[in-house]
Amino acid sequence: MTTWVVTPVYRDTGSFRILRERLLEVLAAEPGVARGPLRFVVIDDTAGQDPKIPELEGLGDVIVLQPPFNLGHQRGIVYALRKLLPRFADDDAVVTMDADGEDRPEDLPRLLAALDEGEAPERHVVLALRTKRHEPPAFKILYRGFKLLFRALTGATVRTGNYAVMPGGVAKRALLHPTFDLAYSSAILALDMPVAYVPCERGRRYEGESKMTYGKLAMHGLRMLMPFTDRIAIRALAAFVLFGLLGVVLAAVVVFLKYFTDSSIPGWTSYIALGALIVSLIALGNFVSLFVLFSQTRAVSLASIEELTEDVELDEDKERA
């Protein structure tokens, strides 16, 4: 058996080196937790533009995968996992995490231990449940707003990221689902996969500054919503029906009061009610249409990309590591 650690790296090789050393130290202190030797898989998210990436290939326990272009951290993880599926044994432990230190190595033993718990441990995924974040106040406010929006649109609560552990057998069965082309972490929730949660505090970056801008964060948030397109469409349809019924009732009330009673109704009341109803229906229809269009245009399939790149080749030294 092998414990695979899959992590995207975007001009952050220094942080990855620190992450690798700390993971080796943590798991060496608890030798009974890891499933076999530790192997690292680095996704070069610069697509060959980072001159420091080749230095990692000299490490005996590191495999470097280079996609043909930048995929972003979530789709980069999916790309790497799909490339490595033939090498995963059913009992392997597949770990996905960020390389900058915000996913803490100290939490990995608890995640691996949770992988063996439950009624059917070979079939579930273990996710790190975020309990505390070290972020600027502005980010925390925006993140809370996003969680409320996510909950309202999907009915699900997002409190997890890329930090996850799954058996190799689960990875081989689940990762080929096209929903993972959209977003890795939220696809696990959207597909209703059996999940176990382990509370983990968000760590701090090892070095440098985050390359994630607010614009990229907004794009990331939209991608998180994409796997839930069906749920969002159903909720939008329910709201559409609700507004439609409300409009019918209001119209019936206005007609009844005008023609069957002596009550006087200001003319502007009817126009305002009708105008509000029309605007609401148009807004709902535009929201659903634009969301579906955005999902389709941004959902670039990874299938053709996998055919463009060569299979992963491991030399004998890395096989023995």
Image: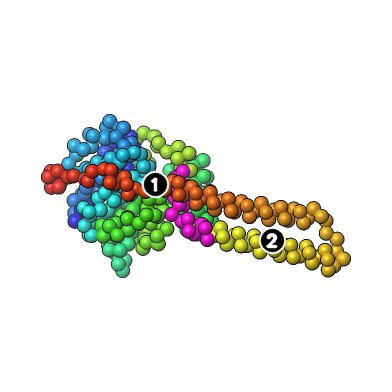
Label 2 residue SS: helix
Residue located beneath label 1 in the image: 300
Q: Nearest the camera: 258 or 30? A: 258
Q: Is 222 one of the magenta-colored residues?
A: yes
Q: Residue at x 51, y 40 (%)?
A: 138
Residue 241 visible in the current orientation: yes
Q: Is the residue marked by circle 2 packed among few (<14), some (14-19), or many (20+) residues within 10 Å?
A: some
Q: Is the residue marked by circle 1 packed among few (<14), some (14-19), or many (20+) residues within 10 Å?
A: some
In the rendered structure, the answer to whether residue 266 lies left or right of residue 104 reads: right
Q: Residue at x 32, y 55 (%)?
A: 175
Which residue lies most toward the top here? 51
In the rendered structure, the answer to whether residue 88 lies left or right of residue 275 reads: left
- Which amino acid is tagged 2? Gly
Residue located beneath label 2 in the image: 247
Q: Residue at x 59, y 59 (%)?
A: 239
Start-end of magenta stretch: 219-234
- How was this image coloured? rainbow
Q: Quadrant of the N terminus?
A: bottom left
- Which amino acid is tagged 1? Val
Measuring from the top left, give residue 282's x and y in whole percent.
63, 52
In the rendered structure, the answer to whether residue 214 lies left or right of residue 87 reads: right
Measuring from the top left, give residue 136's x and y in whole percent.
47, 40
Contact flag, marks 1 and 2 (Cβ < 8 Å): no
Residue 34 visible in the current orientation: no
Q: Residue at x 27, y 32 (%)?
A: 52
In the picture shown, does residue 20 fall above or below 127?
A: above
